[in-house]
Image (cartoon, grey):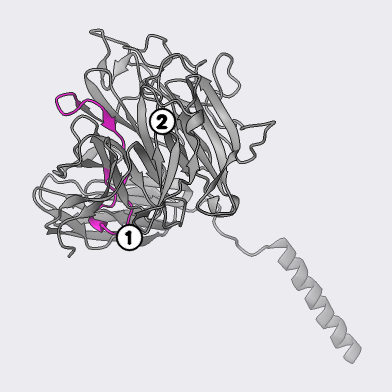
Amino acid sequence: MLIERTRNLFGLLVLGLLVACKTPPPGPDPDPAPGALAVTVIDLPAGLPAAVRVTGPGGYVQDLAQSQTLVNLAPGEYTVTANAVPGSGLTYLPSAGVQLAVVAPRATAHASISYTGVTFRLGIQQVATLPGAVFLASPPGDPRQFIVEREGLVHIMENGVLLSTPFLDIHERVLSHGEGGLLSMAFHPDYATNGYFYLYLSDKLHGIVVARYRVSANRNRADADSELVIIRIQKIGTTHNGGLAGFGPDGYLYMATGDDGGTGDPYRNGQNLDSLLGKVLRIDVAHSTQGERYRVPPSNPFVGQEGKRPEIWAYGLRNPWRFSFDTNLLYLADVGQAVREEVDISSVTQGGLNYGWNIMEGSICYDRPTCDRTGLTLPAFEYDHGHGCSITGGYVYRGKAIPELAGHYLYSDFCRGFLRSFVYTGSGIAAPTDWLISGAGNILSFGRDADGELYLIASKGAIYKIIRTSPSR
């Protein structure tokens, strides 16, 4: 009897296993239905656009200037980031800077943002004076500020005090005539562990050089003998050198070069894809050695195309004077010839863009009544020479000291010395603001420290920190 029951139980168990094998349990829907997200914006004056960004799965990014329902969204978690909006005499602060919204299939999630107007002003505070200063940067997470001097030195400012001994002195390798010199530095994202930093300079033979150096055992001194030239680009003249190298969010090193000068790009470099001048370049320096200084990312737009340099990421530039990244966007300021100054804004995934020089200067045809604009990318923002003559590109503010300024791109002009900003919404420019600072003089460059706070560097060596001059709410 016991044996018979055991046989029956065993038979039922085998039958159950067979059924389970034939009918697998239901899994997740391989293609779930889309959902929606309704973003509501209230309490902004009529005609004043909001500054809201929505990010989500798969690299989704959408900028909003008003209430809107986003449809056909992949289910998942979305982040709604609202930035302050400058108005006439007031700055409007969002009720919630960051919100999370979960979008479910066939359902609509909701996020609501209300704004409150407060009095808000910016000012500048001088923190140092260093004749020849042209750039300021900090390694990730480092409280020190490194100040680049055009003649070929790098100094450290720590706790508001300039250290007496330079961090690096390579003045004998630098040609500082014309627009040349040591023009910027960039710290490797892993500087804290590998000690690498990169300098952008013009050398004694009129070449643009980007070279890697390493910090010594003393954290406040670099090893001047550790130089590894990553790339060198020969020029003819001493103007239109560009002047910046920096790491993008993709980990690659970007460089912005000028067209080699002269009126109207006489060497025809801007549109020449066999030249590295008048371009944004993108290279991989993760494994740089004496034998292989850099690699070309396989996703660069002109890889494998005959007669086109694979290092090129974008082209059609005259004299790009400072670029910066903000999340997935590249902001690039290009100095105009005689009429327009421009800021070009693009996604970091958009390689191969042609910004138009010398076919166009800004959004107008250069030196001709008409021109073919086919395939050209026009500026996201521009101003004419009634408002300045040489743009100085800056940064999108992401610091903590001035939360009302979050999301605003700050820029200046060498001739006018103003401090202005705007918000890029993805579809246009919003909240243009003149912060009405005075006394700084000609502005050579912006700087940014590890906390995201911004600085202005004036032509006579004065270094200013941008601060709020109105009480916080």
- Mark nearer the viewer, 2 or 1: 2
Q: Relative to 69, is 58 on the left or the right?
A: right
Earlier in the chain: of badge 2 and badge 1, it is 1
Towards the viewer: 444 or 356: 444
Q: How crowded is mark 1: few (under 14 residues within 10 Å), some or many (20 or more)?
A: some
- Quadrant of image for the N terminus: bottom right
Which residues are drawn in magenta? 384-409
Q: Residue at the bottom extreme?
A: 1
Percent across and percent down for residue 439 are 16, 42
Can residue 405 be found in the magenta stretch?
Answer: yes
Q: Is 401 above or below relative to 166?
A: below
The residue located at (41%, 40%) in the rendering is 148
Towards the viewer: 293 or 221: 221
The residue located at (42%, 10%) in the rendering is 267
Towards the viewer: 73 or 96: 96
Where on the picture, by quarter, is residue 286? top right
Percent across and percent down for residue 67 are 22, 51
Percent across and percent down for residue 30 are 56, 52
Q: Which SS class for mark 1?
A: strand
The residue located at (36%, 34%) in the rendering is 322
Can residue 251 be found in the magenta stretch?
Answer: no
- Quadrant of image for the C terminus: bottom left
From where the camera sits, is residue 348 visible? no
Q: Residue at the front extreme?
A: 164
Amino acid type at mark 2: Gly
Q: Relative to 294, is 246 on the left or the right?
A: left
Q: Relative to 272, is 94 on the left or the right?
A: left
Q: How far apart are marks 2 and 1 (CA)?
A: 35 Å
Percent across and percent down for residue 196 are 56, 45
Q: Name the residue under label 1.
A: 98
Q: Name the residue under label 2.
A: 243
